[in-house]
């Protein structure tokens, strides 16, 4: 999702000199770029992140952090910081559908509060067996956390108010020119460049990479131009006839809209579908208040904090995710309609995937061929996720809101019952998505070693934990109360499961020879071997199963393959 704000925070002044030479230059200081800087910085890689904006996000933008993203935040040690932000810990995270926010409720899916999520996650199994549950928090709160952790890495330099102007891939390095807000130019030499610079990515355009997929999909809702308002309405809760929610969706024939609570008190991110002939670019604040009142079904005092527009109806994936020493990630590589909240979360996993691979190559324990697996793994995943987001958008956006929904008549009652039944089914399709969240896989990747088993079916609303190589490791809570994922090494982990697993010396020797940072995690806890359906499983730094099995004779060949090395002669 791309918004064009009419209000920006004051500039964030640069401090200190820019480095002239770095390992990785990152263009873009949103969640993808910041997460990449953390992944690199934690591994001792020197990176420079630049962004022409004055600072992190002012407007809410993305508002949902999925469970898989929260698991990565936990892996890096700050999931608890993110979960403490946004809504108060006891605020509902329900998604509710209304004719208008202050009128008839049509459907509601109830979800745990932030406080309940922390307790409940330890009781869940099956599809929702996880170390973390989703968290409803605005991107504007997440980005400062990411920025703080990126800046804490000694090798990182972050500079907002400084944009990438142009670059050239010189074969052995990338030569780039930056320009600061005061007009000064700076030359930087980097081993690699990553364009995490958003939907209008200058890096993607410079590479000549076109979009694949579909765009311009028109729907009654979530298809076409949308108005975005960031507003403060302290009196809103008092005007509601029903219990509060996190997301409110207005379904009526006059104005389709949705609204997410930002702080759980008075701030909201409001998005409205434009009617034919409307030009939100020319709206005054009075126009914005009028449109909000249409969705609200009541007049109330509103302070407009920012106004913008964005275009729904995208399901686009870049035809290439890089060229030579230059890569693209996040919105530069894929554009979503935000149903399902998949854009920001897919962008975070781009950074997680690319980060350990760049670090492995730069540190000399993997050949550059490892970097080819970034596109091989992430591009199919982006196509999968944009297709799911399109399916969710079709489900809600092609539903036709009839005028009778607003009528206090028997016909209106009947229309609301019919709409409520439909929207109840839709809410569960879009918002109960463990399969989308946990089920992304890298089957066919050159650095995954298949074991001949078939992965579970890819279904949005169901997830079957499986250690079939190429997917997320099955989760469990250990006898000491820790998450299994908390016991993983920060780099490579070889799980040795059961009371008498095979000897692991072959893997340890192969890892030592190639510079792979590997630790063996021995867990005799009953049930884990059955959960993984093998006594050994090799888990990558991004928490993906690279190999599993019981025979260790091919350990050296397996280690070579998962690092991107060619087979030994």
Image (cartoon, rainbow, N blue to C red):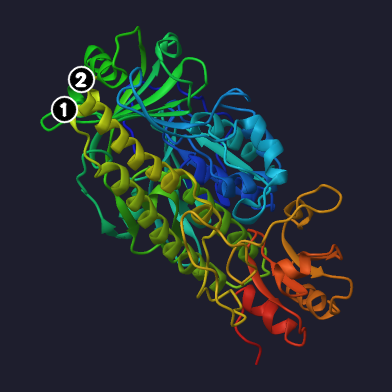
Quadrant location, the C terminus: bottom right
Other-residue count near label 2 (Cα within 10 Å), few / some / many at <14 / 14–19 / ≥20? some
Marks 2 and 1 sit apart, C-alpha to C-alpha, by 7 Å
The percent coordinates of residue 465 (x first, y second) are 62, 62
Above or below, 70 against 257 in this view is below
Helix, strand or loop at label 2? It is loop
Along the line of sight, which residue is nearer the eye, 65 or 8? Answer: 65
- Quarter occupied by residue 318: bottom left
Above or below, 137 against 188 in this view is above
Q: Residue furthest left?
A: 277
Along the line of sight, which residue is nearer the eye, 266 or 247? Answer: 247
Whether pointer 2 and pointer 1 mark residues with C-beta atoms closer than 8 Å, the reply is yes
Question: Is residue 520 visible in this depiction of the protein?
Answer: yes
Dot label at residue 279: 1
Lateral position of residue 557 relative to residue 427, left or right: right
Question: Is residue 197 visible in this depiction of the protein?
Answer: no
Lateral position of residue 136 relative to residue 516, left or right: left
Along the line of sight, which residue is nearer the eye, 208 or 477? Answer: 477
Helix, strand or loop at label 1? It is loop
The percent coordinates of residue 488 (x first, y second) are 76, 57
Other-residue count near label 1 (Cα within 10 Å), few / some / many at <14 / 14–19 / ≥20? few
Which residue has dot 2 on it?
Answer: 283
Above or below, 446 against 168 in this view is below
Along the line of sight, which residue is nearer the eye, 429 or 202? Answer: 429
Q: Residue furthest right?
A: 499
């Amino acid at each position: 999702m791309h918004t064009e704000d009419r209000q920006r925070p004051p500039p964030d002044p640069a401090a200190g000199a820019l480095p002239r030479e770095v390992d990785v230059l990152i263009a873009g200081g949103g969640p993808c770029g910041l997460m990449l800087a953390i992944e690199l910085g934690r591994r001792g890689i020197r990176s420079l992140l630049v962004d022409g904006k004055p600072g992190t996000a002012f407007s809410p933008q993305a508002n949902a952090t999925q469970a898989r993203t929260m698991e990565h935040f936990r892996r890096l040690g700050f999931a608890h910081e993110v979960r403490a932000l946004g809504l108060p810990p006891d605020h509902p995270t329900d998604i509710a559908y209304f004719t208008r926010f202050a009128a008839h409720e049509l459907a509601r899916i109830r979800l745990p509060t932030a406080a309940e999520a922390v307790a409940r996650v330890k009781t869940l199994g099956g599809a929702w067996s996880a170390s973390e549950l989703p968290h409803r928090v605005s991107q504007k709160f997440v980005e400062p956390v990411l920025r703080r952790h990126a800046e804490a890495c000694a090798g990182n330099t972050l500079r907002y108010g400084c944009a990438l102007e142009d670059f050239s891939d010189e074969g052995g390095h990338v030569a780039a020119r930056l320009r600061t807000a005061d007009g000064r130019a700076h030359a930087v030499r980097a081993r690699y460049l990553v364009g995490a610079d958003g939907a209008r990515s200058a890096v993607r355009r410079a590479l000549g990479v076109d979009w694949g997929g579909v765009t311009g999909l028109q729907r009654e809702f979530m298809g076409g131009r949308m108005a975005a308002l960031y507003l403060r309405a302290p009196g809103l809760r008092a005007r509601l006839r029903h219990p509060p929610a996190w997301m409110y969706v207005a379904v009526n024939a006059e104005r389709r809209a949705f609204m997410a609570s930002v702080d759980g008190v008075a701030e909201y991110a409001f998005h409205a579908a434009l009617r034919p002939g409307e030009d939100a670019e020319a709206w005054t604040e009075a126009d914005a208040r009028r449109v909000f009142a249409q969705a609200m079904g009541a007049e109330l005092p509103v302070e407009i904090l920012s106004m913008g527009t964005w275009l729904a109806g995208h399901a686009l994936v870049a035809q290439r995710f890089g060229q030579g020493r230059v890569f693209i990630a996040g919105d530069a590589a894929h554009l979503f309609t935000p149903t399902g909240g998949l854009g920001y979360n897919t962008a975070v996993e781009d950074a997680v995937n690319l980060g350990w691979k760049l670090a492995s190559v730069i540190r000399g324990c993997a050949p550059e061929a490892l970097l080819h697996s970034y596109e091989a793994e992430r591009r199919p995943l982006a196509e999968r996720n944009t297709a799911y987001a399109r399916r969710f958008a079709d489900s809600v956006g092609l539903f036709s809101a009839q005028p009778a929904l607003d009528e206090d008549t028997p016909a209106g009652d009947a229309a609301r019952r019919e709409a409520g039944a439909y929207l109840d089914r839709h809410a569960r399709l879009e918002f109960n998505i463990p399969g989308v969240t946990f089920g992304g896989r890298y089957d066919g990747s050159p650095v995954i070693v298949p074991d001949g088993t078939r992965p579970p079916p890819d279904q949005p609303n169901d997830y079957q934990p499986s250690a079939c190589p190429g997917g997320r490791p099955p989760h469990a809570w250990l006898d000491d109360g820790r998450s299994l994922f908390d016991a993983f090494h920060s780099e490579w982990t070889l799980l040795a499961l059961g009371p008498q697993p095979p000897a692991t010396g072959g893997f340890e020797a192969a890892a030592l020879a190639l510079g792979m940072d590997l630790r063996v995690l021995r867990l005799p806890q009953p049930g884990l071997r059955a959960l993984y359906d093998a006594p050994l499983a090799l888990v990558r730094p991004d928490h993906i199963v690279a190999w599993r099995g019981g025979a260790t004779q091919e350990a050296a060949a397996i280690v070579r393959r998962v690092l991107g090395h060619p087979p030994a002669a």
